[in-house]
Image (cartoon, rainbow, N blue to C red):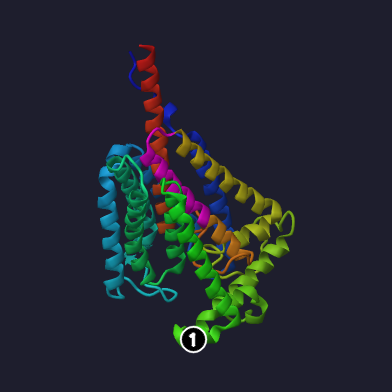
Amino acid sequence: MEKYIKKSDRFDWSLTLLLFLFFLISCAAIYSAQSTGQYAGRNFMLMQAVWYVVGAIIISITIFFDSFQLKKLSWILYGFGLFLLIAVYIAPESIAPYRNGAKSWFVIPGIGQIQPSEFVKVFLILALSRVITSHHEKYIVKSFKTDFALLLKLGFTAFVPFALIMLQPDLGTGLVILSIVTGVILVSGISWRIILPIYGAGASIGGFIIYLVLVRPDLLEKYLHVQTYQFNRIYSWLDPYTYASGSSYHLVKSLSAIGSGMISGKGFRHGEVYVPEAHTDFIFSVIGEEYGFIGGSIVISLFFLLIYHLIKTALETNDSFNTYICTGIISMITFHVFQNIGMTIQVLPITGIPLPFISYGGSSLMGNMFAMGLVYSIHYHHQNYMFSSKKSMSA
């Protein structure tokens, strides 16, 4: 009797199609963006294609690790991620230089810059998933005390990398960490009697701080010693044209580019508005200008299809550990997309968060491809499990 189905039938072809479409969109958008001349002589499109190949290799390795092996590796990867974050913080500037005011990258000769936090996000997802499954295996009967203990475990596990990332400082990645933790907590089984008061209090405090920034910044300066220039990010977000020559220069250019694209865009490589860092954080501005509302809508729809596919994979898997992994990845990708596109159209303040699979960046792409490798692994081993179960029942 045949024990396993063919490997090709266990492979996630739907996810492969989505990633291939993102690859085409990324190369086309980066090719147009690099023609602005900001970084003359560098072929970012070719480099992005190389990173996609590296990402494909990462997926081809990750896919063969089942949930049992990933559980064993979760704390090892988590510890390795913390080591990298500490190393990048204490390393000399010749190895880990400051870039845009943050010390977040290693410079590796012949390779380029590697940002450890992009991998730590995925390592954290594995660690949080391990914490939840281990907790539920130990405490079969739930209570307020066990739920609160689980919340503390998750909070401490996330706090350590979050604190190290904020020391760099990297607010964008710190917010991604918070989104991952929030998503995982919501499906962890913790009672809403605990979750609602905590997140309600957090939202209230955040709203109150924003109110003080807008109405009484003098109180923040007096009691929290916040400097005036630190308010500019919010001021330039709410009133970009007043700060068009300074802190909101990127936003004004992005709005001009996307707005000038109108419905159908100006066409491939016909962009006219110069947007700094268009090949990285502001890649959506290029898409909006050259392909208009229609092109932007297609890209957003592809991300909706990706999220739908991840949710479907999370619901179909027979292992709760895998479900938590998918949830963390969904939270990470969703926040990245919402924040990146939102900041280019003034819905959200600007943070240094790339658009997944489309923005240029080796570390970001490899981290996301590693996350996709976990999804491939879940689908690959689940299909074999379902086949084996059916064979056992028929026998």
Q: Quadrant of residue 389?
A: top left
Q: In x, y percent, where is residue 339?
A: 55, 61
Q: Kindly identify the amino acid type of the residue bearing the numbered disc 1.
A: Glu
Q: In x, y percent, where is residue 182?
A: 45, 55
246 with respect to 80 (left or right) = right
Q: In x, y percent, where is residue 176?
A: 45, 60
Which residue sits at x=55%, y=41%?
308
Q: Quadrant of residue 64?
A: top left
Who is closer to the viewer here, 111 or 361? Answer: 361
Magenta: main secondary structure equals helix
Q: In which quadrant of the rendered image does the N terminus lie?
A: top left
83 with respect to 316 (left or right) = left
337 with respect to 54 (left or right) = right
328 magenta-colored: yes
102 magenta-colored: no
Q: In x, y percent, where is residue 352?
A: 49, 67
**Residue range (magenta):** 317-335
Q: In which quadrant of the rendered image does the C terminus lie?
A: top left
Q: Quadrant of residue 195?
A: bottom left
Picture layout, residue 380 above or below residue 77: above
**Mark 1, secondary structure of its residue:** helix
Which residue sits at x=34%, y=57%?
152
Task: List the residue tagged with mark 1.
Answer: 221
Picture layout, residue 46 above or below residue 318: below
Which residue sits at x=33%, y=52%?
145
